[in-house]
Image (tube, rainbow, N blue to C red):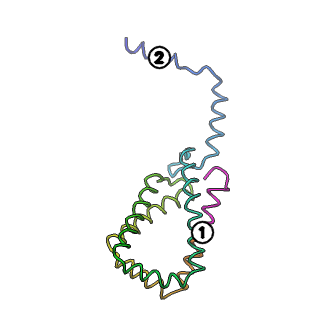
């Protein structure tokens, strides 16, 4: 008896429209979406999340890179002093860890170059925050190396500027497939 009811229920939900037209619309929509690593298309929500994150991270990286390039002497004084202030390093590490975890929790997609970049940004921010909290000496050593090699700081700033410009383009100007 349950089987007969199941058959009736199935027939009640049979499509009453043209299935070929519906499939054609679906295929067109799927073709517009990037593919995930499993070959499945990225959903509209995932693509929108990637664009949203790129719109925030990209301009932040651009401003940070310009600041690093134009105020390098300030950073040469600021960074060693910052790393000597244990409560400030701990607080900065906690906020960086939280920001990285929130970013990765809200966006862990690997379906397009932009999605990978956003997800990796979250992971790297979480790792940086955790290291500032758990091993601030490591951060102090990296800071000292960076200060002694100004070209390293400038090179990192240029890469950050290019990365930020690319993410900004993906988030604000690229077609809606990122």
Reading the image, the residue beneath label 1 is 62
Q: For residue 92, what is the image quadrant?
A: bottom left
Numbered disc total: 2
Q: Is mark 2 on a helix, strand or loop?
A: helix
Q: In this picture, is 21 found above or below 47?
A: above
Q: What element carries label 1?
A: helix
Q: For residue 85: magenta?
A: no
Identified at 55% across, 53% down, the residue is: 50
Reading the image, the residue beneath label 2 is 9
Give the dominant element type of the magenta stretch: helix, strand or loop.
Answer: helix
Q: Give the range drawn in magenta.
A: 161-178
Identified at 40% across, 15% down, the residue is: 3
In front: 178, or 133? 133
Q: In which quarter of the image is the N terminus?
A: top left
- Would you say 78 lies left or right of 113 here? left
**Image marks 2 and 1: residues in contact by CB distance under 8 Å:** no
Q: Give the x, y percent position of residue 161.
A: 60, 71
Alpha carbon distance from label 2 to label 1: 57 Å
Q: In this picture, is 173 found above or below 129?
A: above
Identified at 52% across, 82% down, the residue is: 74
How packed is label 1: few (under 14 Cα within 10 Å), some, or many (20 or more)?
many
């Amino acid at each position: 008896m349950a089987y007969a009811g199941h058959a009736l229920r199935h027939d009640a939900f049979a499509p009453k429209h043209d299935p070929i037209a519906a499939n054609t619309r679906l295929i067109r929509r799927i073709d517009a979406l990037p593919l995930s690593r499993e070959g499945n298309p990225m959903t509209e929500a995932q693509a929108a999340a990637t664009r949203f994150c790129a719109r925030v991270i990209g301009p932040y990286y651009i401003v940070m890179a310009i600041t690093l390039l134009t105020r390098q002497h300030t950073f040469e004084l600021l960074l060693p002093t910052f790393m000597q202030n244990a409560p400030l390093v701990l607080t900065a590490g906690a906020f960086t860890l939280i920001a990285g975890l929130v970013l990765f929790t809200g966006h862990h997609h690997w379906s397009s170059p932009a999605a990978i970049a956003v997800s990796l940004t979250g992971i790297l921010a979480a790792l940086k925050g955790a290291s500032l909290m758990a091993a601030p000496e490591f951060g102090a050593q990296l800071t000292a190396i960076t200060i002694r090699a100004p070209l390293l700081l400038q090179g990192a700033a240029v890469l950050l500027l290019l990365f930020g410009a690319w993410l900004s383009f993906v988030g604000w100007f690229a077609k809606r497939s990122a």
